[in-house]
Structure formats: C-alpha cells, structure tokens
Image: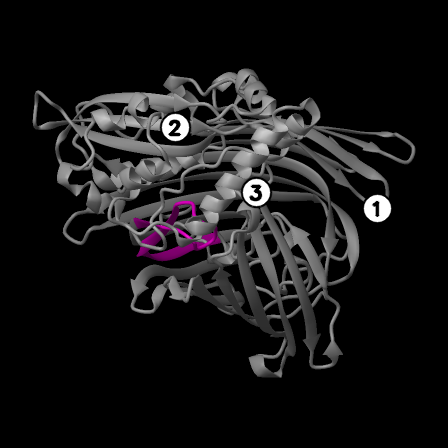
Amino acid sequence: MAVTAQATRVTREDMRPRHRDSLDYDQLKEMYWGEFTPDSIRLPDSKRSDRMYDSLKSKTRRRRVPRLLYKLLFVSPQLDTTVNGQVIDEARELSCYEDMTIGEIKIRREKVFSSEDSWIERLGNKTHVMTRERILRRDLLFKPGDKFNAQLVVRNKQLLLSRKYISDVNVEVERDTIDTTRVNLILRTRDSWTVSMDANLHSEGRTMVGISDANILGTGNRFNLETNFNRKNFDFGGNMAEYEMPNVLGSFFSSRLAGGRSFHNTRLEMEVKKEFLKPSDYELGLSYSDNKSRSYLLEEDSIVLVKERNLDVWGGNSYLLPSIRSSFYLTWRYNYRRVGRRPDNVTPTHHPFFHDHDALLFGLGLYREKFYTSSMIYGFGNNEYLATGYKAEMTGGYSWGEFSDDIYLGTSLQSGTFCRMGYIMGDFTLGSYIDKDTGMWKHSAIDVNLRWFSHLFMVRRSHIRQFLGINYTQGWNRNTGNDESIRFTRYNGLQMLKEKILGTNRLAINTETIIFTPYQPLGFRVAIFAFCDMGLLGYSPNIFKNNYYSTLGMGVRIKNERMVFSTIQLQLGIAFGKGGWADCDYFKLTNAARLEQYRYRPTRPEIVGFK
C-alpha cells in the first residue's frame, strides 16, 4: 500500500513484470527491502514452510479430490514488503518531487486474486467486474498540470483505501525523461471481492438474510438487500434496501437512499453530503429520515416503539494558513427533530432524549494533520497509518425545545504525536446546555481519552508492543430517563464483562501486551496477547466511591497468508468486582482482533453537534 518513489538502485526496466517473473524469492526480497532487515518471522521457518507447501502441492496434484481440497484451503503467499516496525514518512520520501508539475497519470488495475492457482480464484476473477478506470480517476485529488504535493498524494491513498471496492493502492512517481520539471504518476490498485451475504438470527424467531454488492458493474456504487421472516411460522417480515454512491459524477459528493420494513421497524433515509478532503476545502450536506423502531430503555429495562422525523442541514469552509501550517475552519448545522411516538411518561425532566427541538449550531477551530506508515500495530504486517497533529474547536448555538429553550456551549481538543516512549494520542471534550430563563447549566459532560502504545521492541526473537488506554467521563446536572446515564462501551469499557451497569461517572483503564512470536508452524504466524481492564462506574461524583469491576485474561491470534480465512482469535478471561465474581464471557472465538479503541480518529473538522 505504500507510496513508492523510484529508487536509484532499481531501474525502471528492472521493475517491469516480464523481469520480475524471472526473479526468485531472494532476489525479490533484495529488490523490495534492500538494506532493510526483513520481517524476522519470515526467515528460516518460512523457508521450511515454503518447501513443505511445495511438497504438499505436488503430492496432491496427482488426484482430483486432494487437489481440490488443497486449492480450497490454501492460497499463494504474498511478499511482505513492509519494514518491520519502522515508522516511515511517505510524504518526506516524496518531498524531492515537491512543486514539480504533474504530467501523465496512468492507472493500472489488478484483479482480486493475484494468483489463479485454484478454481475458486479463477472463477472469482472471471465473475468479478473490475472497477472502471474512470471511477478510479474521478477519485483523484490532483490532475495533470497541477503541482505535485506529497501530503495530498498520501491523503488520496487513504481516500481510495476507504472505498470498499479497493483493497490495495500504490502510487509510483517517475521523473519525465524529456522534461525534468515534470513527473509522471502510476496509480496501481487491486480490487476487493465486493459481493457478500449476511444473516441474523433472533431467539424469538425473527430471521434476516441479506446480500450486498459494493461495486455494482464496476461503478463503485453499493446496493444492499435484506429479507426478514419468522423461521418458526415463516411469516414475512418485510424487506430493507439501501443504495449508496460514494462519489457522484466526480463531485466528491456522496449520496445514500435506504428504506423498507423489518417486522415492527420501518425506515426511510436520504442523505447527500461532501466532507473536508483537503486543507483548504468545504463541506456541505443534507439528510432526512423518517423511522419507526423499537428502542430498549436500559434504565427501565423495557422496550418501547419510537417514531421520529429528523432533518439535518450543515456546511463549512476550511482555509490553510501556511504561516502556522494549520487550517482554520468554520462550520454550521441546523437540526429539526420531531418524535411522533414515544413513551407515555415523557416530562420536561424525564426522557429528554425524546423531546422535540430545533437547533442551530456554529463551530470554529484550527487543525493540522500528517500521516506516517508503520506495521505490527493492529495487524501482523500490513501497512498501517499513524497520524500526528491536533484539532482545537469551540462550538456554540441555540436550541428551541419542546419544554424550554437552551443555549449550548462546547469545546474540544485532540492531539496525536510521537515521543521517546512510543506513540500517544488524546482528546478532551466539554459541553453543556444553559437554560435561557434560569441561567442554570444542565446536561453537562466532560470526556477525556488517552491512548498510548510503545515502539516495537525485541526480546530474543519475539517482537513486543504494549498498549494502554484511559478514559474518564463525568456528567452532572443530568435528568432522568433514556441516555441520561452512561455505561461501559465497546471502546471505553471492560471486554468480557456482561453485567449492565449505569452511572454518570466512569473511569476505564485498558492494557494489552502483544507478543509477535518468531514461530511459524505450518506457515501460521502466531501472536500471544494478555489484557487487564479496570473500571469504576456509578452516580457518585467521587469516582473512587463507585462500583469497581475488572477483567483479565489472555489469548492467541493466528494468521496464515495462504489460508482463505486468515485470522483466528481465541480469547479466555474472567471478570470480578467488589462483590466477587461478575458475569462475563469466559471464552470467545472470533476472526477480528481487539484494539479498535486505539485506532486513530481523523483530526479533520467534523459536523458540529451536541455533546
């Protein structure tokens, strides 16, 4: 996925496919890695595994059934081109081309499966419709004749990788052989397999089956269809459909239309929006929804039917200030919300979430953002992005409510950077309403997050990385009812814990240690991890007087590049509190790793909204 400049030790002729085909594995490693030390978990054990797989493949080739089983279970390995744990500044590597004129831009599209060793891969490539070249070209943030901007190239890579129909992106930069002030770009993309099926089973008999395609006829548009029925008596529950266009006619506006019925729930949603993409840019959007759904009131342990209409209109502009290398932005938002069906016990101080209101909000702030590339953070070896920068924002506005009119004030600060101990990012948010008539503050909340992980370091032949996350959230002057309390969540909570706990004051500490072992039995990469989570949650302003819970455990993540289903996670854990053992999931088997809360959230300005 890395943006690559042409290296002086590798000529343009050396990189042509007809030469690459004649190179063996060691020569490929030298071409891509050069003087860098390759991933240690691909060294001696990897070569022995390669010989084992070659022998297994030759023995199963003679008979039909073993041959089909081999092709079904194994895929050809891909060369891991990431530098082991090293942080790379792609924009700096491309800075030598800064301000040069962009000449020709070529696009090279690659199929979903690079090797067609199995009939599944051959069938997949034949039935898959490749993303059209014009669809890729309209997603470019630059065009021939523009000045080369390294940061914009890296940002464009992220935009392309955010498309569900693209799995890999590479941008190569070459100096023009005739005009030395020009550079030519080669954009290489690999398609994703975008057709998928989904299903959901509920204990009371409700069943959903669905099918979706995120790249209809190579246009990049997504269509999803879900059918609902009761599997006990086969009563029809309705259909849900959704159609999405990520880039309408190259305008960078996205549109989405969704509607249908699912048993007691009905949905109608329409949205058109454009987000900030460049340091100097604009955003504009409109969304409308008319939904009816069953809502679970955690505080009352009951389910009610809620019907609401919602209209959102927003916009904003950002302006790059070169003197401070930051962007200044202004945003605004108007929100109209009407709740047509709600609980019967709604009052001015109970269930304010279900109150009707009109609101007008404004925001202003500064932000700066730069991305770096590394690996072995959330995954095993793929390129991953780390961001440095900051965002400082102030938000204010007015709300015309069903029972009272309020003023809203809020502020937030977010930052991420490297330090000697690793990478650290944090954010602070404070927001509150002010009653217009009494001047009293209400629905106030403060939220503080700190995320850190260490550099990748070695102990003998293993690579180790340490993660730490801290969240503190406190609310005061809250009312009662739905969404007036907080609980442990997926990002700020205790994994494995099943108990439902409520409060207005929360402290959660998450730690995890990951060991990337050098062992590779049968080609499987093995990572061992241990975690310990601690949390305090309750209604007392003194956080240490609230209920205490903790979970701890360990697990293993296994990955094999040859396997179709490449990642497996096995997790064991226990939970306990002040009163002893707590209800928890003692065992989990999934295909996804944790650590979502450590992933970077962009510092670019977002739509201003309520806290």
Instruction: Tell us which disc is closer to us: 1 or 2.
Output: 2
**Residue 396, magenta (yes or no):** yes
Q: Is residue 315 left or right of residue 45?
A: left
**SS for tag 3?**
loop
Q: Residues within 10 Å of mark 1 (few under 14, many from 20)?
A: few
Residue hosting label 1 = 203
Q: Is residue 448 visible?
A: no
Specify whether 542 is left or right of 396: right
Q: Nearer the viewer, mark 3 or mark 1?
A: 3
Residue 187: x and y in percent read 31, 27
532 relative to 169, above or below: below
Q: Quick one: quadrant of the N terminus?
A: top left
- Mark closer to the chain start, 1 or 2: 2
Q: CA distance from mark 3 to mark 1?
A: 30 Å
Q: In terms of image quadrants, where is residue 229?
A: top right
Q: Which residue is mark 3?
A: 566
Q: Are marks 1 and 2 in contact (CB under 8 Å)?
A: no
* Kind of residue at disc 3: Ser
Q: The residue under label 1 is which amino acid type?
A: Ser
Q: Position of residue 80 (x, y in %)?
A: 40, 42
Which region of the structure is painted magenta? 371-398
* Place of residue 460 in the rendered image (x, y in percent of width and height, measured from the top left): 41, 66
**Along the polypeptide, which appears first: circle 3 or circle 2?**
2
Residues under numbered marks 3 and 1 in contact, where contact means CB atoms less than 8 Å apart: no
Instruction: Please say whether residue 348 is visible from this viewpoint.
Output: yes
The answer for how far apart the CA atoms under marks 1 and 2 are is 43 Å
Give the labeled residue for mark 2: 189
Label number found at residue 137: none
